[in-house]
Image (cartoon, helix red, strand yellow):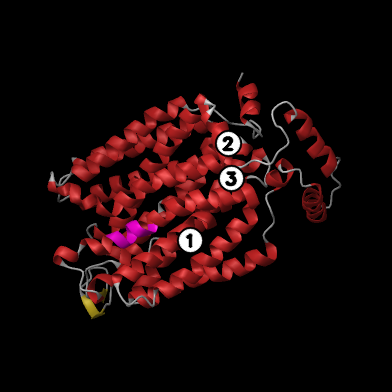
């Protein structure tokens, strides 16, 4: 995803040294190879938008697949597809073919990352849920920052795409051999054999005997849901009807969809344009990634100590405040402006990872994949617009930053409409969730 920060550059040379002033060598970017300048300059930015459009398509189709066929096949095939199409995109003869490849890659990225998060979240106890953010966040930062030395060493965008896509192929192969199905999914589908196998694996690794059987867990769940389900397998229409019949979950879906759109827009806006800040673009890019690590480390502590709602709301408030303060920093105060930029990136990164945990807990299992898929699809509107945010400078130079601040302030207010989910069990159905709330 973040390779767009470098492959769409307009630079035609790469220089070593912090000041970008020594030992320059030729650089082949997507923009320079396909002559995307003047009236064609926007085509380079549209390759990033194509990735986000693919996210929208994948968020809908693959989330439905995950609810019907299981989390494991959706994650496994998406990861393999992500790596394969990414490598294939390096052979694109023109920007239009590359955009199509990026669209497919974006679709697979949703299945690999978003549904992978859902799978992991449904396999751990509620006491450890918030700490999953630290692991996912650390791995994201590792990949994010790892792109900078790759871009520094590889001066041709085609080889850079190859190098950044190949690890997904390796990971996909590992998934085929090691990835389990979601425990919560197996139980909710009444899969006794799969649940028993999952529990046996837990006993083997923990050296402990579980005091209950798979049949007991599933029977208890069926008894609790006997009044709510007809016993027929859920279809896409039935899941949608279940959502539409609940006004409160429609509201939650709207709020979380906005939060995801806001966070996607602000996060990618700050990330993609970090290479345009004053100073060395590789250093600035790495700093914008490294600042996420403490955000992901603090996030689980805040989620457990302060609760989900306050953590997300205050995080957006801090983002808006930092971006608003950035506008008033004098042009010659580069260190101060970079500090406010990094504070904003720190805060929005914390919010971004927190809403994954929050969204997974707000929705019941029966519609969780559908609702998160809807949020993911809508959020890509923000992702589509992020590469083009510089167009707002036509109004006046600081308007993009003010726009970031306004979106974050509104997100802070809307978060207050969501329920607190700290230390509450994941509901299986809408009626279960309503009963717990009442």
Sort mark 1 into few (<14), some (14-19) or many (20+) by Cα contacts within 10 Å.
some
Q: Nearer the viewer, residue 378 or 167?
A: 378
> Which badge, 2 or 3, is on the more N-terminal residue?
3
User: Quarter-wise, where is residue 305 in the image?
Assistant: top right
Q: Does residue 47 show up magenta in the picture?
A: yes
x and y percentages locating residue 161 in the rendered image: 40, 72
User: Quarter-wise, where is residue 171 in the image?
Assistant: bottom right
The residue that mark 1 highlights is 142
Tell me whether circle 1 and circle 2 mark residues in contact (CB < 8 Å).
no
In percent of the image, x 48 and y 61: which residue is there?
142
Sort mark 3 into few (<14), some (14-19) or many (20+) by Cα contacts within 10 Å.
many
User: Quarter-wise, where is residue 33 in the image?
Assistant: bottom left
Q: Nearer the viewer, residue 199 or 218?
A: 218
Image: 316 above or below 142: above
Q: Can you say which quadrant of the picture contains the C terminus?
A: top right
Q: Which of labels 1 and 2 is toward the front?
A: 2
The residue that mark 2 highlights is 361
Q: Does residue 156 show up magenta in the picture?
A: no
x and y percentages locating residue 387 in the rendered image: 28, 55
Q: Main secondary structure of the magenta part?
A: helix
For this view, does 152 lie left or right of residue 428? left
x and y percentages locating residue 382 in the rendered image: 34, 46
Q: CA distance from mark 2 to mark 3?
A: 14 Å
In percent of the image, x 52 and y 33: which residue is there?
308
> Which badge, 3 or 1, is on the more N-terminal residue?
3
Image: 368 above or below 53: above
The residue that mark 3 highlights is 131
> Which badge, 1 or 2, is on the more N-terminal residue?
1
In percent of the image, x 59 and y 37: which residue is there?
238
Question: What segment carries the magenta color?
Answer: 46-51
Q: Secondary structure at mark 3?
A: helix
């Amino acid at each position: 995803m973040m390779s767009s920060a470098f492959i769409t550059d307009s630079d035609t040379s790469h220089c070593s040294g912090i000041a970008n002033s020594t030992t320059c060598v030729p650089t082949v970017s997507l923009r320079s190879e396909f002559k995307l300048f003047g009236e064609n300059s926007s085509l380079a930015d549209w390759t990033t938008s194509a990735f986000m459009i693919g996210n929208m398509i994948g968020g809908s189709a693959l989330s439905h697949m995950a609810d019907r066929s299981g989390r494991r096949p959706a994650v496994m095939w998406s990861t393999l597809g992500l790596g394969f199409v990414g490598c294939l995109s390096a052979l694109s003869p023109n920007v239009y073919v590359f955009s199509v490849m990026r669209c497919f890659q974006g679709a697979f990225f949703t299945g690999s990352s978003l549904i992978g998060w859902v799978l992991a979240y449904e396999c751990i106890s509620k006491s450890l849920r918030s700490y999953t953010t630290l692991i996912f966040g650390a791995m994201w930062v590792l990949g994010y920052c790892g792109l900078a030395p790759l871009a520094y060493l590889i001066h041709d965008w085609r080889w850079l795409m190859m190098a950044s896509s190949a690890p997904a192929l390796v990971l996909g192969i590992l998934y085929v051999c090691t990835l389990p199905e979601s425990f919560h999914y197996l139980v909710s589908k009444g899969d006794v054999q799969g649940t028993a196998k999952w529990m046996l694996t837990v006993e083997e690794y923990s050296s402990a005997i579980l005091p209950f059987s798979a049949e007991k867990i599933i029977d208890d769940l069926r008894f609790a849901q006997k009044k709510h389900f007809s016993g027929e397998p859920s279809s896409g229409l039935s899941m949608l009807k279940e959502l539409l019949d609940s006004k409160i979950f429609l509201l939650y879906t709207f709020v979380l969809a906005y939060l995801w759109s806001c966070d996607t827009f602000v996060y990618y806006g700050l990330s993609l344009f970090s290479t345009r800040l004053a100073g060395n673009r590789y250093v600035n890019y790495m700093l914008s990634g490294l600042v996420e690590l403490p955000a992901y480390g603090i996030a689980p502590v805040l989620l457990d100590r302060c609760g989900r709602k306050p953590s997300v709301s205050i995080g957006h408030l801090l983002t808006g405040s930092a971006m608003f303060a950035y506008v008033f920093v004098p042009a010659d105060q580069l260190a101060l402006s970079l500090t406010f930029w990094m504070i904003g990136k720190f805060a929005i990164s914390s919010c971004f990872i927190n809403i994954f945990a929050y969204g997974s807990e707000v929705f019941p299992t029966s519609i969780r994949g559908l609702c998160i898929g809807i949020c993911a699809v809508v959020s890509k509107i923000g992702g589509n617009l992020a590469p083009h945010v510089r167009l707002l400078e036509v109004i006046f130079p600081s308007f993009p930053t003010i726009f970031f601040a306004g979106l974050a302030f509104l997100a802070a207010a809307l978060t207050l409409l969501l329920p607190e989910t700290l230390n509450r069990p994941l509901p299986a159905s809408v009626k279960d969730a309503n009963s717990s709330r009442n």
